[in-house]
Amino acid sequence: MKRIVVLVSGRGSNLQALIAGVETGSISGKIVGVISDRTDAVAIEKAKYEKIATSVVDAKTTRSHNHFETTLMNAVQQYQPDLILLAGFMRILSAQFVKFFAGSIMNIHPSLLPAYKGLNTHRRVLAAGEKAHGCSVHFVTSELDGGPLIAQARVSVKADDTPQTLAQRVLLEEHRIYPYAVALFCADRIKMDGGECLLDDKVLEQPLHLNQ
Ligand code: GRF
């Protein structure tokens, strides 16, 4: 059983999907801790409700970014995780942090990476007149939203979409593909090696396309 720590900042719908994946047995792991950088994250309430241990490393009250990171690193290490999942965690982790946990951090991002790294992806996709959008799960490296891709799901953009309607459809896909990728990791089927993602010991040339 892999020990999983989830880092959150907001409402925690991906956390909820991961909890469901563990409960149904599709993820062979245990969420041993949920850590937030905000005292008011709804995700922390969700974790408490599920009787999962929680920690808050309040970015507002820590002295400096360095101090925040050291405190965060200690909080993460306390749980002795095999896997760290970023699920709407709104802080950029330093190269040092990422290196320390290399190959053990995954993220879900609301775009078809490498397109639309960063924030406000739905609005930017609509502004560019894209026909397709989606979400990606990837290993985290020191390059923002740039680590090796594991899985993606595609969503068609509709003529009358708003950032909100598009976000909702993408989110449903996030809730499917993140637990799927985590299940593969927990089954020892995927790993990061030399800056690439290996599936069953073979380099994954393309991310897994998990459209229904
Ligand atoms: C998701 O859209 C995720 O892709 C992005 O932040 C959002 C978090 O949502 N990184 P939630 O807190 O999991 O509901």
Image (cartoon, rainbow, N blue to C red):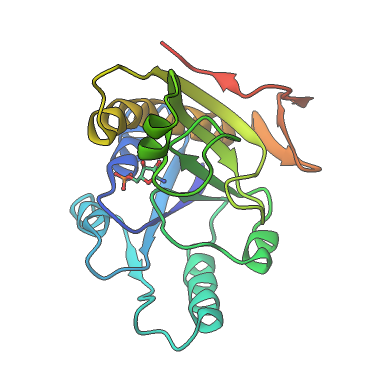
2 versus 34 height, above or below: above
Determine whether, in the image, residue 163 is placed left or right of residue 202: left
Q: Residue 14, relative to residue 118: is it above or below?
A: above
- Residue drawn at 43 percent across, 18 percent down: 131
Q: Which of 49 and 173 lies nearest the eye of the viewer? A: 173
Nearest the eye: 93 or 119 = 119
Ligand 1, what quadrant? top left
Residue located 49% across and 49% down the image: 118
Question: Residue shown at 67%/48% (left/top)?
Answer: 103
Which quadrant of the view contains residue 179? top left
- Name the outermost residue toward the right: 194
* Residue farthest to the bottom, as pictured: 63
Q: Residue at x 42, y 40 (%)?
A: 121
Coordinates of residue 187 in the picture (x, y in percent): 58, 30
Examine the rendered structure and indicate whether residue 95 appears above or below residue 61.
Answer: above
Looking at the rendering, in which quadrant would you find the C terminus?
Answer: top left
Percent from the top left, x then y, of residue 22? 37, 36
Residue 164, by quadrant, is top left
Side of 30 where 102 appears, left or right: right
The quarter holding residue 125 reads top left
x then y, percent, for residue 146: 64, 44
Extreme-top residue of the structure: 212
